[in-house]
């Protein structure tokens, strides 16, 4: 896999090849201008991140520009909350749009003028039939559709009706404006597509100024044209719309410049649902705690989970762009964040499921500072002092009453090293009435302090936190939200049937080394031997909350084997 990625990187992908050719032939004056066109009807997800990295990335690569354009043609589902979150997410990923953000709604006036022009040229008409009937008359690709009885209205009548539609004289759904193209085209999108519908709804930007709204196909290409976009990238499902994209442009283009639509495969991730509708459902039904729940594939969820912009950009680079739909293993996304966090995070001591270990021969009241290097991956890493004392916490899992041979951690009569400190030997332990271990008693060998040069072979090294100095924290262990590889891909089963009941485990009594007391929301760490963690936005001094980003190793890879 690694080799493939390398060689892919060197050769241009098909979009780069097109852009390069266009520059060389001086098409559109050699300009490169892209856009990212989200509809503000939800939060952005990792699929959008792919599109963002692609569009903004190409603009950077070819010295071009990239617009942010809100595709806000559907007032019913759209909201400023989404507009704001989208801007924040793009900035966080490290991209900058050209000029001010743009809005398709800014072009409603121009689109209306162009629609009037089409009517005057006999290329658009008002249809009084309900939308269902219009769809029915379109028929099937193999046979011509049925022409609307209103198709041959006079230009004057169409102009009058269209103006009155705009003025609000008609009810929602009672009329539409259609392009007059070809009711027998094998491409269903060319069978007199709807350009405008009536919607008496308040728009988050234009308020009540408009009660007719353009359809996506009529708005998109014209917006591209208004903005001088040269390469209009979209996902494969729009390939079939391309002839219509071009037909609409044919009606309005003056001069040499025109935008070109290019399709690429959308990102699909295993164990993930990516449809905004389904994500909205998870939020509205309270299955997750909001759009930024760390289990959501949204950019805000990934950010809260502890993902870095670099890890997401690296992921987007790795997966590249293709012309065919495929599914990417979510493990690759997790790999990308692990890889980056491994480089940048300090290694800290944190015990998530604590049990007390008492060193019986260690002096009461004595505290030693143990020196630990912050990040061994970083040559210039600083180190810090961590207090060690007679009573420490270790992980419950690191002790077994009757350990099997291969268990290299602590058990009766066994020796381990406490990281950065001493070798200890388990002499005894205590249990409560339910058989749970409550205390472990050890002796230590004072000769074996780390760095003293005196050592002997022990198989295990455990992390620990001095009980007296420990700070408490809540730790939220997040895992994949779905336990099925393709939760949305089952025909008769709802995707929510495949929720992973263990996607969130909350541990309330975790013990951390004292240097974590000042950690602030967003700070990221490796907890030694456990995984990567970040401070949650709910965290407060004295009431720390950490999220697990990913475990140190991919536990799902093992499971599926
Ligand atoms: P909707 O169904 O609401 O239209 P959408 O996923 O198409 O949802 P948009 O806001 O229209 O959402 O998408 C903005 C841009 O992001 C579009 O250019 C779209 O092609 C791209 N995009 C959306 N989902 C993905 C994905 N999974 N992979 C790559 N690009 C995507
Ligand atoms: Mg869309």
Image (cartoon, rainbow, N blue to C red):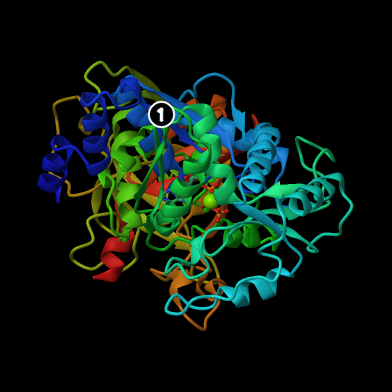
x%, y% of residue 390?
43, 36
Can residue 481 be spotted in the picture?
yes
Circle 1 packing at 10 Å, graded few (<14), some (14-19), many (20+), is some
On the image, the x and y values in percent for residue 347 come to: 35, 32
Q: Residue at x 47, y 66 (%)?
A: 482
From this viewpoint, is residue 389 visible? no
Which type of secondary structure does the marked residue at label 1 adopt?
A: loop
The correct choice, above or below, for 237 with respect to 370 in the image is below
Residue nearest the observer in this picture, 220 or 559: 220
Q: Position of residue 138 (x, y in %)?
A: 56, 73
Near-viewer residue (363 or 123):
123
List the residue tagged with mark 1.
257
Residue 445 falls in image quadrant? top left
Q: Quadrant of residue 374?
A: top left
Residue 391 shown left or right of residue 222 in the figure: left
The residue nearer to you, when weighing 404 against 110, is 110
Of all residues, the one furthest to the bottom in this rendering is: 492
Horizontal side of residue 198 vs 336, given as left or right: right
Q: Can you tell which quarter of the image residue 451 is in?
A: top left
Q: Identify the residue at horizontal 58%, vertical 58% (top origin).
A: 180
Give the position of the C terminus as an image quadrant. bottom left
């Amino acid at each position: 896999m690694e080799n493939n990625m390398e060689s892919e990187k060197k050769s241009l992908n098909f979009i780069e090849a097109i852009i390069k050719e266009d520059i060389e032939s001086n098409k559109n004056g050699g300009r490169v201008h892209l856009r990212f066109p989200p509809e503000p009807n939800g939060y952005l997800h990792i699929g959008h991140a792919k599109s963002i990295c692609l569009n903004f990335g190409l603009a950077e690569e070819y010295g071009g520009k990239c617009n942010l354009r809100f595709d806000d043609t559907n007032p019913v589902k759209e909201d400023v909350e989404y507009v704001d979150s989208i801007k924040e997410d793009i900035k966080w990923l490290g991209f900058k749009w050209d000029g001010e953000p743009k809005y398709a709604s800014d072009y409603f006036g121009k689109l209306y003028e162009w629609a009037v022009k089409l009517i005057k040229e006999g290329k658009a008409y008002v249809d009084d039939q309900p939308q269902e009937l219009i769809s029915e008359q379109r028929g099937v690709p193999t046979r011509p559709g049925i022409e609307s009885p209103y198709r041959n209205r006079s230009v004057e009548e169409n102009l009058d009706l269209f103006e009155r539609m705009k003025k609000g004289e008609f009810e929602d759904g009672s009329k539409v404006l259609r392009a007059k193209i070809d009711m027998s085209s094998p491409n269903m999108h060319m069978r007199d597509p709807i350009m405008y519908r009536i919607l008496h709804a308040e728009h988050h930007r234009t308020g009540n100024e408009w009660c007719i709204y353009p359809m996506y196909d009529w708005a998109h290409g014209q917006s591209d044209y208004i903005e001088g976009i040269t390469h209009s990238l979209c996902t494969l499902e729009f390939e079939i719309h391309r002839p219509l994209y071009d037909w609409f442009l044919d009606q309005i283009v003056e001069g040499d410049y025109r935008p070109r639509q290019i399709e690429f495969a959308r990102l699909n991730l295993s164990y993930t649902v990516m449809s905004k509708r389904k994500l909205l459902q998870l939020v509205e039904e309270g299955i997750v705690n909001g759009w930024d729940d760390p289990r959501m594939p949204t950019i805000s969820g990934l950010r809260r989970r502890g993902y870095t912009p670099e890890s997401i950009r690296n992921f987007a680079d790795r997966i590249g762009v293709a012309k065919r739909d495929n599914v990417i293993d979510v493990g690759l996304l997790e790999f990308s964040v692990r890889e980056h966090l491994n480089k940048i995070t300090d290694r800290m001591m944190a015990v998530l499921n604590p049990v007390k270990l008492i060193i019986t021969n260690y002096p009461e009241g004595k505290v030693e500072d143990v020196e630990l290097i912050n990040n061994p991956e970083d040559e210039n890493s600083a180190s810090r002092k961590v207090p060690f004392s007679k009573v420490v916490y270790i992980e419950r899992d690191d002790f077994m009453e009757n350990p099997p041979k291969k268990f290299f951690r602590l058990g009766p009569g066994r020796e381990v090293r406490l990281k950065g400190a001493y070798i200890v030997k388990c002499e005894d332990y205590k249990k409560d009435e339910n058989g749970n271990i409550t205390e472990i008693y050890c002796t230590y060998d004072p000769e074996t302090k780390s760095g003293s040069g005196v050592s002997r072979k022990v198989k295990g090294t455990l992390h620990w936190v001095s009980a007296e100095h420990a700070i408490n924290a809540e730790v939220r262990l997040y895992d994949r939200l779905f336990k099925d590889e393709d939760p949305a891909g089952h025909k008769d089963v709802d995707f929510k049937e495949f929720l992973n009941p263990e996607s969130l485990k909350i541990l309330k009594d975790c013990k951390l080394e004292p240097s974590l007391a000042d950690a602030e929301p967003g700070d990221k760490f490796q907890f030694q031997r456990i995984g990567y963690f970040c401070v949650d936005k709910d965290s407060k001094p004295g009431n720390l909350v950490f999220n697990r980003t990913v475990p140190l190793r991919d536990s799902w890879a093992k499971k599926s084997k």
